[in-house]
Amino acid sequence: MRGAATRFENFYGQTNFDEVEILAISDVAARTNALTSGDVNYIDRVDLKTVAQLKRNPRIKISEVAGFARYVAPMDVRIKPFDNNDVRLAIKYALDRQQVVNKVLLGHGSPGHDNPIALGVPFAVVPKSKHAFDPEKAKFHLKKAGMSDLKIDLSASDAAFAGAVDAAQLMADSATQSGISINVVREPADAYWDNVWMKKPWCLSYWNGRPTPDLMFTTAYQTRAAWNDSFWSNAKFDKLLVEARSELDPAKRATIYEELQNIVADDGGVVVLMFYNFVNAHDNKVQHGTVASNFDVDGLKATRRWWFA
């Protein structure tokens, strides 16, 4: 896949380039080779295993920013056992997220605590419960759900994100300490988004960031939102979300958004596994200023805001 554009006379807009060519190179090794050989000036989604090697190349610069994007594991709350919030909480406490960050992201990210609003987004907070790895709390919630152990399937494919299958296995490994047996079902990459996401009871997925809590919540957490991939519904959440939109007092609005984030973390059906950094690379011809956090490729504005030295 290829796209090309040439700046023309009386061009309306901002750009520092006379010509831009965008190539889709899905294979990460081929993408890296294209940069190191000089065939392209910039690549996104660098293979994290090669970051140190690329840094040693005097022609290459790494661009890394802690972003709003995250890797998640939505549970279909309409289906047993995920319809029981104590089961959902047991799963949330049973996962060693820091281990996943260390081994899958190689440290280029941070653990999620089941709040989809990243720090840096206006009104973002750390949830009060902060679901860190705690097998005893996981067992407590399993017992509240009337269970001594739990066996569940987790659908995974690297189509969801690079390293998703490895992440799923790490989730399964840590969950055993809480009496939870996670069977990792390796799904085909082709048609993953058609046949698995929002189809299978529990799967891995990802979300890009949104600049405001309202936009994220309205898109994927409000009752009957088209992309509410856990099919979660909470009447109090829906009511507060509408109230927050019309609240003009910043302090009162912040209080509402804090409560919304805590409701999602404690009752929601999505495991927010980890936030990942945007790690990209470019040759030393390319220059840029501060890089945006909301989306990859400088908030999808690199072709407008970057320039050649």
Image: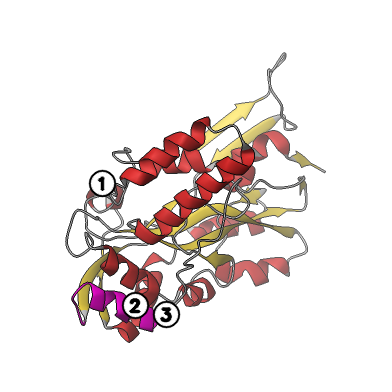
Task: Check disc 3 and give the amino acid type.
Answer: Asp
Of residue 251 and residue 78, the one placed in the foreground of this image is: 251
* Colour scheme employed for the rendering of this structure: secondary structure
Q: Distance between the residues labelled 3 and 2?
A: 6 Å
- Specify few, some or many for label 3: CA neighbours under 10 Å numbering under 14, 14-19, or 20 or more: some
Quickly name the residue at label 1: 194
Residue 208 placement (x, y as % from top left):
49, 48
Could you tell which of marks 3 and 1 lies nearer the N-terminus?
3
Instruction: Mark 3 and mark 2 in contact? Answer it, CB < 8 Å.
Output: yes
**Left or right side of 297 for 103:** left
Where is 3 relative to 93, above or below? above
Residue 194 placement (x, y as % from top left):
25, 46
Rendering quarter of residue 308: top right
Inspect the magenta stretch and tell me whether residue 146 lies in it.
yes
Instruction: Mark 3 and mark 1 in contact? Answer it, CB < 8 Å.
Output: no
Could you tell which of marks 2 and 1 lies nearer the N-terminus?
2
Q: What numbered label is drawn on residue 134?
A: 3
**Left or right side of 267 for 294:** right
Task: Check disc 1 and give the amino acid type.
Answer: Asp
Question: Is residue 116 visible in this depiction of the protein?
Answer: no
Does dot 2 land on a helix, a strand or a loop? helix
Q: Viewer-nearest of labels 3 and 1? A: 3
